[in-house]
């Protein structure tokens, strides 16, 4: 079945460092891909998404490009802030209405000043 | 828009007791999902509904777990009897049932369940 694999954390960075969190997927057809973020004590929020190959999703300085040839959707940010400390989840859903999101295990990011 | 509303936010119960978690999806959303989050297993899909009908419950761990959606604005997840290994954060999410993929799910703040 469909699945998502994320790099294991935790990732610890200094403020203004470059961030990459790797995500690869296995799916039939052409899924949509998502990054969600979870701040401490809260639910998940959508960070960005891409619905077809070569699309780039971006939000709040974060970017990810849908690479069909490598089945990847890596999350990047050029300069992280302390406020970016959170758990990041890569997810996919299939190309039918009302299908459920399948999540990776999450990567914890800790940014220090 | 109030978002997805879950109750209670925290629940502590004794092993063997019945636990009921509640969810109110965003108005107009036709898909509803229940997820469980633990350190060991990450975020697991338990069950989801489209138009109040259960579509896939293959993630429900065992018969002690049951979920219902009696109408478009309310769903429950029940555990009876509860066990310590059920301790986790349970999330409800909803999504508009529009055509095609790419539709995001909106999450509630979760219910942290502790079974002692």
Image: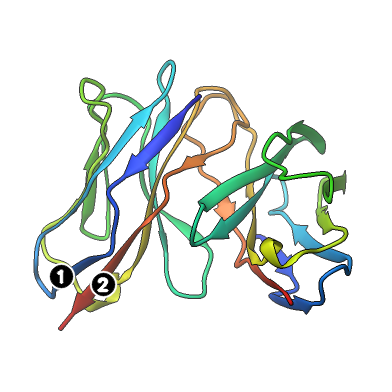
Q: Which residue was labeled with disc 1? A: A13
Residue B15: where, in percent of width, then height? 82, 71
Residue B30 position in % (x across, y down): 72, 39
- The chain to which mark 1 is attached is A
- Residue projecting furthest to the top: A29
Residue at position x 84%, y 51% in the image: B64
Viewer-closest of B66 and B96? B66
Query: Please, what secondary structure does the residue beneath circle 1 have?
Result: strand
Q: Position of residue A47 (x, y in %)?
A: 37, 54
Q: Is residue B74 left or right of residue A16?
A: right
Same chain for marks 2 and 1? yes
Q: Are marks 2 and 1 in contact (CB under 8 Å)?
A: yes
Which of the 4 quarters of the picture holds residue B54?
A: top right
**Residue tagged 2:** A110
Q: Residue furthest bottom?
A: A113
Q: Assess disc 2: are there few (<14), some (14-19) or many (≥20) residues with their C-alpha within 10 Å of its C-alpha.
A: many
**Residue A36 against residue A24 in the figure, above or below:** below
Q: Quadrant of residue A67?
A: top left
Horizontal arrangement in the rendering, residue A101 relative to residue B2 (left or right) = left
Q: Residue at x 84, y 44 (%)?
A: B63
Is residue B70 depicted above or below A99 in this figure?
below
Visible residue check, residue B30: no
**In what element is the residue under mark 2?**
strand
User: Is residue B80 shown left or right of residue B112?
Assistant: right
- Mark earlier in primary sequence (2, 1): 1
Residue in view at x 53 percent, y 52 percent: B43
């Amino acid at each position: 079945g469909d699945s998502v694999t994320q790099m294991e954390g935790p990732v610890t960075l200094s403020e203004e460092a470059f961030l990459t969190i790797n995500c690869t997927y296995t799916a039939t057809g052409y899924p949509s891909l998502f990054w969600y973020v979870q701040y401490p004590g809260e639910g998940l929020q959508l960070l960005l998404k891409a619905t077809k190959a070569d699309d780039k999703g971006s939000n709040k300085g974060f970017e990810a490009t849908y690479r069909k040839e490598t089945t990847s959707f890596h999350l990047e940010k050029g300069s992280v802030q302390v406020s970016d400390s959170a758990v990041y989840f890569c997810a996919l859903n299939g190309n039918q209405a009302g299908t459920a999101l399948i999540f990776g295990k999450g990567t914890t990011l800790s940014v220090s000043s | 828009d109030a978002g997805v509303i879950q109750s209670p936010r925290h629940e502590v119960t004794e092993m063997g007791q019945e636990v009921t978690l509640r969810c109110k999806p965003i108005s107009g959303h036709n898909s509803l999902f229940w997820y469980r989050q633990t350190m060991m297993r990450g975020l697991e899909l338990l069950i989801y509904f489209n138009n109040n009908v259960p579509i896939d419950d293959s993630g429900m761990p065992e018969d002690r777990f049951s979920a219902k959606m009696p109408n478009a604005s309310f769903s429950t997840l029940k555990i009876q009897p509860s066990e310590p290994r059920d301790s986790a954060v349970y999330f409800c999410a909803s999504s508009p049932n529009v055509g095609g993929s790419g539709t995001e799910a909106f999450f509630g703040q979760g219910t942290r369940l502790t079974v002692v």
